[in-house]
Amino acid sequence: MHGTDDQGARLCPNCRSPLKAETFEGIELDICETCAGIWFDMGELRRLMGSEQHALIKTEDRVKPSGKPPMERSDAPRLCPCCRQPMEPYRYMHASFIWLDGCQRCSGIWADDGELQLIEEWLLNRSQRVAACPEDLAALDAYATEHQRLMDQKRAMVEVMKWWKMRVRM
């Protein structure tokens, strides 16, 4: 089974503890009870954000570390809990100071403890800034759409290359 330990559990990319499935706003998320990180399968972060006002902060408040201090972020790549491939760190919305980890293979997202609150605060501040300059929001949305298109294209190319390599070996 991909992305699991010997007992079939998804593992935390931060501290390697088994992740626990919990439902938040009708969305099943995988949480780490040790370091309070949260794994979002493809589309779940967006669904959570659209579920209700302050859903990110409410979710963050429900997930608390077990008391063991979280590990320091290292330079070693974190592995996706689903497919065990190295994840890529990226800036949330490309312009924020918030670094998340994303899996290019399965499109999941890892958020460390505290990052959901930072996202909510950043979005609130951004919306206040953009209210004064709506053309910036339009440009940012266009950039985000183009980025998503390119990421989808990259994932498709990776799959084609895998298929081609398998075919050449035959």
Image (cartoon, rainbow, N blue to C red):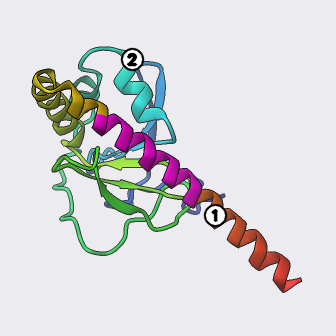
- Which corner quadrant holds the N terminus? bottom right
Is 108 a magenta residue? no
Using the image, tell me which numbered label, if any, was put on residue 157: 1
Using the image, tell me which numbered label, if any, was put on residue 9: none
- The answer to whether residue 7 shows anywhere in this view is no
The magenta segment: 139-154
Q: Main secondary structure of the magenta part?
A: helix
Q: Which residue appears at 15% of the width and 35% of the height?
A: 122
- Which corner quadrant holds the C terminus? bottom right
Q: Residues within 10 Å of mark 1 (few under 14, many from 20)?
A: few
Q: Which residue appears at 71% of the width and 66% of the height?
A: 160
Instruction: Determine whether the residue tagged by mark 1 lies in a helix, strand or loop.
Output: helix
Three-letter amino acid code at the position of disc 1: Met
Residue 110 in the image, given as x and y percentages of width and height? 37, 49
Examine the rendered structure and indicate whether residue 124 appears above or below residue 77: above
Instruction: Determine whether the residue tagged by mark 2 lies in a helix, strand or loop.
Output: helix
Examine the rendered structure and indicate whether residue 146 appears above or below residue 76: above
**Occupied quadrant, residue 82:** bottom right
Three-letter amino acid code at the position of disc 2: Ser
